[in-house]
Image: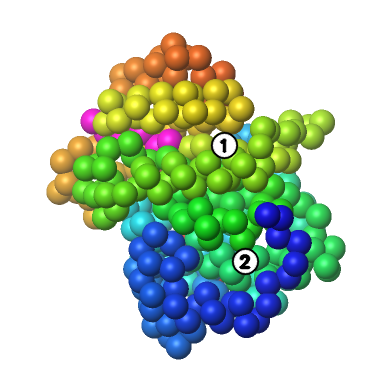
Amino acid sequence: MNNTHPITDSQLQLYMEDCSICPRACHVNRRAGQVGFCGQTGELTAARAALHFWEEPCISGTKGSGTVFFSGCSLRCLFCQNHDIALGERGKQISLNRLADIFLELQDAGAHNINLVTPTHFIPQICAAIQKAKTMGLVLPIVYNTGSYEEASSLRLLDGLIDIYLPDLKYFSSELSLKYSHASDYFEKASAAISEMFRQVGTAQFDSAGIMTKGMIVRHLLLPGQTKDSKKILRYLHDTYGNDIYVSIMNQYTPLPHVADIPFLNRKVSAEEYERVLYFAEKIGIEGGFYQEGETADESFIPSFHYEGLL
């Protein structure tokens, strides 16, 4: 399937009237103002649209990634670094036409790409906005930046519209995913979603400046005390995709005040933990990867959400 036909208003309405876009399958009528687990109605809501310089080097480059942070989330991890917007506590409603204009404004600002952060619950609207923006002159690669708790069937709506997938693979253990993200089926859903993403975009491609134009980078955020789970994730990715994908192993976990009483989550990842996981990645043959140097567990990775670029 390649989505070259614009999504219609009637299709948008159907998706919103009985929502099963993500694995929560709440079946609420978001068009009528009801909210599901994601905390959002059928109205597009975002918290920030601006150039962003803290992604992987081949995404941010020197000019920045044109990032749109959407409000709400289908996961709501206990340790979420963007918890204010994940819980829907911050955000401004914008029209589909305004979202298309934002894409073009980010392109005019020099962005290397358009980067959609936590977009899952707005997939139908995003499809329509991308299609509209392309008719108005949008030529940048589109990045889909997700926690990966996705339905593969919903991702198929994006086929032909997304150039780069930037998914997380957070957990291998269903016990951990239930404890920290209220989703015992996380690995099952996320691994199926990542498979569909790879089917759509294939192996990575770069321009002459080293900026990714097509492909997939799977991110894994190391959690304190969970190196065994991290190794299982890396083994799975390498056994499944070899070096046809890039893997980003991150140590930037930041223990924010709301997890101060939760064991393990209330501390940073140690240098020893991170080194053990990086050594394992090298040992099993992961070649296309990114790692982080120095002290990255800092709130500087968390942008302010004051509706920049939305109005």
Q: Which residues are magenta?
A: 220-225
Q: Is residue 136 left or right of residue 5?
A: right
Q: Say if the magenta span includes residue 162.
A: no
> What residue type is disc 1 on?
Ile
Q: Is residue 204 left or right of residue 120?
A: right
In the image shown, does 81 or 23 lie closer to the viewer? Answer: 23
Q: Secondary structure at mark 1?
A: strand
Residue 230, image x, y percentages: 35, 29
Q: Which mark is residue 237?
A: none
Residue 146 visible within the image: yes
Q: Which mark is residue 217?
A: 1
Q: Which mark is residue 126?
A: 2
Residue 252, image x, y percentages: 41, 37
Q: Earlier in the sequence, mark 1 or mark 2?
A: 2
Type of colouring: rainbow
CB-based contact (under 8 Å), mark 1 and mark 2 = no
What's the CA distance linking mark 1 and mark 2? Answer: 21 Å
